């Protein structure tokens, strides 16, 4: 059952990801990417990470991609003119990508995974709650990185305002 | 005969989902009728009267509307992006319906040893799920506006994207206060914890904030800039007709019911009665009905915001207020040692 | 049985698709989207290992990556808009001169 659900959403994600790269219209690409994000969110639910799943849909699909769509529409959507000077590089790039994927798969398959396990078994997670567990970690062990992200967001905000402001 | 528990669960979910969808479609049909009567009343008009103004015959008005809508020409503008143009209205309705998976309608009921829960799923992240699903709603409008290949539609779609993203932030912040005092993201828990006293007593600012943002999220007056008839013709739905337009319309009304149900669940005790009186679905329905009436009342009385006013109000008033509310809630909770 | 290898393979495939996307497309918006896809593939690997190791550090990392991605997209899109204002085109091959 678990495996069937995985294959369903994995194939949706792969097809949509290919669609994003292949489709000529930028809005169609963005839509494909939205499908990838939602399929991945479904996989996160399957992997006992509902908090990440919700955050994925909210931040990636709901905020980041909407920003993309907004900019695509703002910059008067024209159909991509194609590769131009780089046309001959396309099959080469696809080949490189394929080799890269096989390489990654081989490395992943041959890697030795550690056998020691942490304290968060699925039963324990169900008992204390996934959000509570991640939240507790964020505010104890990972407090400094968490605070730094807030600084990062502030810097990004200032940067964007400076960049986008009319001179 | 023994039943496979998985099949029982599947059947259970399916039946509930179908009941909720049918109920919401019925609600949509009669909300359009109610809205026309309410607006007519406010504007001292008679309102719809061709089918029959009073008595049981008036109930057929939505049927007449539906027949009229279905028999209109299904039109697709030249150079429109056909796939996206067709997809957008369906997406709008689907996303509007999604939120209902986690809203508890009534306390559990036990019949013949089988306990019926009146929600489709009680997930630990229900409140986050609502926000996540809500954030997807903007896609339908933006895509509908863009694919129509019309300047008015595109402007309406872009306006709506900016508006919905801006007000989503404050909407989320308004709910954070409730989540803090409940200590849970599950809507079932949140409702149960409001048994004697509703959350609105502790979170009055959050409640008002939520209500304002909810109106903006549903694109209703006074925040109906994306479809402003007088300046954008009808915004993103200009090029839509027949059933596709009806779907957009349906999504808008289902969204109104949804945000009303969320407001009732988070702040007004959901299915809990005042002071713990007779909990049951009737309270939730009553609360939703009151909210819906207020939506219609506002549409009949209020003028529209100007776009810059809308943005300034969202970012410079609602957002700081939401942050201050979260901060104050945290300080009070620490002082009370909760 | 769903093993960690299934997920890592999926992650590898998605990452490669993203990498190819950066190579073959000349529209900076789509290249940028491809980079987001690569980030997502990494997130999937993190969540997969978090489940396998029964340790939530991976999920915390994903949360931090989400934040970084949001900041990155905001700045990146602002740069693309600035580029468009400057040159009236957003083809990356046209933007090969540093000054101007």
Image (spheres, coloured by chain):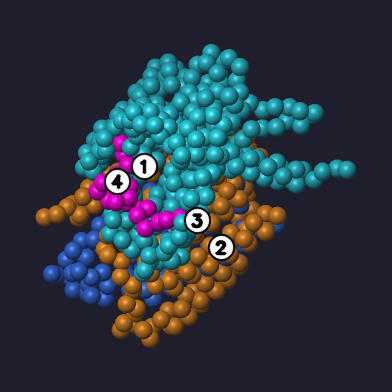
Numbered disc 2: secondary structure: helix
Quarter of the image that includes the C terminus of chain A: bottom left
Q: Colour of chain A?
A: orange
Instruction: Specify the label residue B204 is tagged with.
Output: none
Task: Give the mark nearer the N terminus: 4 vs 3.
Answer: 3
Cα–Cα gap, marks 1 and 2: 32 Å
Cα–Cα gap, marks 4 and 1: 10 Å
- Asked if one can make out residue C49 in the rendered structure from this viewpoint, the answer is no
User: Which residue position is annotated with label 1?
Assistant: B219
**Pointer 4 and pointer 2 on the same chain:** no
Q: Which residues are magenta?
A: B222-244
Q: Which chain is cyan?
A: B
Question: What residue sits 30% from the left and 36% below the top?
Answer: B222
Residue nearer the viewer, B183 or B129 = B129
User: Which residue position is annotated with label 2?
Assistant: A12
Q: Residue furthest right?
A: B1
- Output the chain of dot 3: B
Q: Are marks 3 and 1 in contact (CB under 8 Å)?
A: no
User: Which residue position is annotated with label 4?
Assistant: B228
Task: Give the mark nearer the N terminus: 4 vs 1.
Answer: 1
């Amino acid at each position: 059952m678990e495996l069937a659900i995985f294959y369903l959403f994995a194939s949706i994600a792969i097809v949509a990801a290919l669609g994003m790269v292949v489709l000529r219209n930028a809005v169609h690409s963005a839509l494909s990417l939205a499908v990838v994000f939602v399929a991945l969110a479904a996989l996160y639910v399957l992997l006992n990470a509902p908090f990440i799943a919700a955050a994925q849909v909210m931040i990636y699909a709901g905020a980041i991609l909407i920003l993309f769509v907004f900019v695509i529409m703002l910059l008067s959507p024209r159909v991509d003119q194609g590769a131009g000077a780089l046309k001959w590089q396309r099959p080469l790039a696809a080949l490189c990508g394929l080799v890269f994927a096989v390489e990654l798969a081989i490395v992943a398959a041959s890697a030795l995974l550690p056998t020691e396990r942490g304290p968060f078994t699925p039963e324990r997670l169900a008992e204390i709650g996934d959000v509570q567990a991640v939240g507790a970690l964020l505010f104890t062990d990972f407090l400094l990185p968490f605070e730094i992200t807030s600084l990062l967001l502030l810097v990004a905000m200032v940067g964007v305002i400076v960049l986008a402001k009319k001179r | 005969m023994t039943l496979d528990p998985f099949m029982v669960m599947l059947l259970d979910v399916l039946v509930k989902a179908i009941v909720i969808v049918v109920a919401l479609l019925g609600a949509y049909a009669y909300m359009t009728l109610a809205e026309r009567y309410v607006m007519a009343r406010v504007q001292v008009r008679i309102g719809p009267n061709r089918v029959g103004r009073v008595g049981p015959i008036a109930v057929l008005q939505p049927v007449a509307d539906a027949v009229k809508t279905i028999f209109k020409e299904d039109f697709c503008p030249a150079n429109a992006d056909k796939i996206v143009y067709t997809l957008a209205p369906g997406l709008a309705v689907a996303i509007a319906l999604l939120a209902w998976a986690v809203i508890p309608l009534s306390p559990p009921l036990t019949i013949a040893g089988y306990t019926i829960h009146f929600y489709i799923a009680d997930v630990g992240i229900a409140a986050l799920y609502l926000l996540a699903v809500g954030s997807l709603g903007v896609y339908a409008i933006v895509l509908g506006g863009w694919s129509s290949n019309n300047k008015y539609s595109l402007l309406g779609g872009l306006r709506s994207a900016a508006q919905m993203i801006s007000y989503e932030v404050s909407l989320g912040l308004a709910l954070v206060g409730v989540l803090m005092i409940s200590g849970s993201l599950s809507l079932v828990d949140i409702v149960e914890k409001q048994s004697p006293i509703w959350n609105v007593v502790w979170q009055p600012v959050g409640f008002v904030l939520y209500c304002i943002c909810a109106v903006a999220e549903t694109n209703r007056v006074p925040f109906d800039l994306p479809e402003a008839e007088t300046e954008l013709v009808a915004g993103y739905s200009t090029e839509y007709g027949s059933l596709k337009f009806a779907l957009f319309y349906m999504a808008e009304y289902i969204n109104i019911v949804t945000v009303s149900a969320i407001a009732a669940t988070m702040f007004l005790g959901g299915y809990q009665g005042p002071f713990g009186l007779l909990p049951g679905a009737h309270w939730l329905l009553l609360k939703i009905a009151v909210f819906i009436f207020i939506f219609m009342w506002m549409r009949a009385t209020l003028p529209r915001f100007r776009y810059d006013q809308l943005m300034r109000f969202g970012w410079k008033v609602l957002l700081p207020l939401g942050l201050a509310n979260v901060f104050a809630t945290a300080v009070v909770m620490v002082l009370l040692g909760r | 049985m769903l093993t960690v290898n299934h997920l890592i393979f999926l992650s590898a495939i998605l990452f490669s698709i993203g990498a190819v996307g950066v190579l073959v497309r000349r529209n900076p918006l789509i290249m940028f989207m491809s980079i987001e896809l690569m980030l997502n593939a990494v997130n999937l690997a993190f969540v997969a290992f978090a489940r396998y190791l029964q340790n939530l550090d991976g999920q915390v990392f994903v949360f931090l990556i989400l934040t970084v991605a949001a900041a990155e997209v905001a700045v990146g899109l602002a740069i693309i808009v600035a580029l468009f204002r400057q040159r009236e085109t957003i083809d990356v091959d046209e933007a090969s001169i540093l000054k101007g």
